[in-house]
Amino acid sequence: MIEISNITQTFGKGRDAFTALRDVSLTIRENEFFTLLGPSGCGKTTLLRSIAGFVYPTAGTIKLQGEDLLTLPPYSRPVNTVFQSYALFPHMTVAQNIAFGLEMLNQPGAQVKSSVNEMLALVQMTDMADRKTSQISGGQQQRVALARALAPKPKVLLLDEPLSALDFKLRKEMQIELKRLQTETGITFVFVTHDQEEALTMSDRIAVMNEGRILQIDAPRAIYDHPAERFVADFIGETNFLEVDVLSVEADDATIKLTSGATTTARRADTNSATGQATIAVRPEHATLSDDASALLRGTLEDVIYSGTDTHYHIRLQDNCRFVVRKQNHPGTMEAHTVGHQAGVFFDRGVAQILRD
Amino acid sequence: MAAQAERRWLLLSPALLILTFAASGPLLIVLVYSFLEAGDYGGVKWVFTTDAWFNVVAERDFFDETIKIADAHVSIFWRSVKLSLMTAVAAFIIGFPTAYFIATRAEKSRDLWMLLIIIPFWTNLLIRTFAVMEIIRNEGVINTLLIKFGIIEAPIQILFTEFAIMLGMVYVYLPLMVLPIYASMERLDFTLVEAAYDLYGTRMRVLRRVIFPLVKPGVIAGSILVFVPSLGAYVTPRVLGGGKQLMLGNLIELQFGQGRNWPLGAALSITLLAIVMIALMFYVRVARLEEPQHGQ
């Protein structure tokens, strides 16, 4: 649906030049909840703004259903944006804000009115229609911003960290709300966030970005379970990194030898086919503590940290690396291990992921 | 509480003193003088009369004592109000895009642009007015160039016309329009402008529906700041109007100088003040109507 090809974006000239996007290409599908995830300054907002038309890429093309978007000014692109600051017009009421885009499209008055009412109902703001935007709460402003952007029925809705100003509980509610709106309206959402949990919760697919590049595009589960690069593994969730020796490679897997000498099977990142030195990632909750001979790694238990839903066991391995195992808590069970205890670590075959160099 | 109230008066006293002696006092004198009889060689005679006020708008025929409207005064009033309004409008037409231009520059260069607007403002009024004269007079820059390029044969009379006065006042008071508009414009959240573009607003519609309503306080302030001094302008009409196109300021000066009719001058001054007050009240009214108070 949206085809972004080889987008490069440079700001400034000469010594002050700053490259925000480096040769970015991706395809966003119809009716998809697509998330651009990355730390601040990674270029995700710049990419969103170039789809909206607020910045013009230095090189590359953006097509929407085959139509070249870059030849169109922002007001002719069938995309709407929900801004991080909401950008509601302070001199208009809630209803007037929602009507704005429809009026700009020269829709007849009656149609505007019915669309506004429909949108007010969709975001449950009917009672607030005649309020000024300064007289409603942050969460309500968020809903109005959504309704305003959805009212003209855009082909794509762009959302620039819209939940970042909300408190934790409201943010959780809005995550579900957003997903519901996306399903109900059938509009393609392109969502920008630096919050990995938000991305995992809502997205159909996630593009992880860093320093102006796209590192991996995949479904949330694939991104989490099989990160392709060290940055992706590190940015999303917690991860243990281990230096290993790749002994042999098969179709999707590879046989690896850990520093302890134990061998197991690890998943292979698509481009990585070499044997020899490599880094693997293992999620703390994918590993278990093991006292028997099956343990792949051994070390000393340094810290036991209780965190409500689960307990984190920090183990200093024999090669002096640190490894974290996470175990979900159950009522009545006490921590079986104490600090200083010699512990073994086990994880299933195929759990470890070999990372791209 | 009593001590606090005392302290408040103490803090207010410098402002009160200035208001009493520098503003209210002289104003009271002017008001009193307007009800006195003119002295033979200027000054006043302490005899109560409403002649001065009568003479503001009417005059008695020298021979048969019939009363008729003082056409000269009325036309000067009309010219003053008309030229001041036109000046405010012209200053807005030039000042608004200027302020927009400056506000949308990179932060670093904005101060420089503002300085360029303000420097003429720091220059002596008389010098600036004579500079305008130099440009528009018959042998001035404009006419010389137009003749040289064969566009016209004889110089166009610009100087000593109402247009010349307006031109001069626009030039002199333009910074008073640009500064408040720029101040509102700088506070404007340009994400709102982006949002309006994003919602299918074309340039002109975004300007009309979003930018203008949000910087309107600055536009109103700028219009008042240009209109009020234009109404009482003295130097500009004197120099560029050449004594033929009088405005209120010149008429008042005339009464205190050659005319030797201080009470009439005083009455005219109060009238000028009244016009300004009416204009201000009108603006306040408009501003209130535009911003309906919500019950919160």
Image: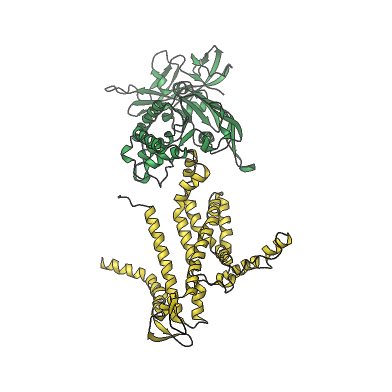
- Image colour for chain B is yellow
**Colouring style:** by chain
The total of numbered circles placed on residues is 0
What shade has chain A been given?
green
Image location (x, y in percent) of residue A227: 49, 23
Q: In the figure, residue B158 lies in which quadrant?
A: bottom right
Q: Is residue B152 above or below residue A339?
A: below
In the rendered image, which quarter is residue A337 located in? top left
Residue A270, image x and y in percent? 55, 18
Q: Residue at x 50, y 82 (%)?
A: B259
In the image, farthest residue toward the front? B64
Q: Is A59 or B133 nearer to us in this picture?
A: B133
Most extreme residue toward the bottom is: B40
Give the x, y percent position of residue B6. 30, 69
Question: Is residue B167 rendered to the left or right of residue A104?
Answer: right
Where is the N terminus of chain B found, in terms of image quarters?
Answer: bottom left
Residue nearer the viewer, A85 or B246: B246
Q: Residue furthest top?
A: A250
In the foreground, B60 or B216: B60
Of residues A185 and B179, which is closer to you in this image? A185
The reply to whether residue A142 is in sight is no
Name the residue located 45 percent from the left edge and 57 percent from the top edge: B220
- Is B277 drawn above or below residue A190 in the view shown? below
Residue B114 image offset from top left, x and y in percent: 56, 57
**Residue A69 is at least partly visible in this image:** yes
In-image side of B267 versus A27 (left or right): left
User: Does B284 sit above or below residue A173?
Assistant: below
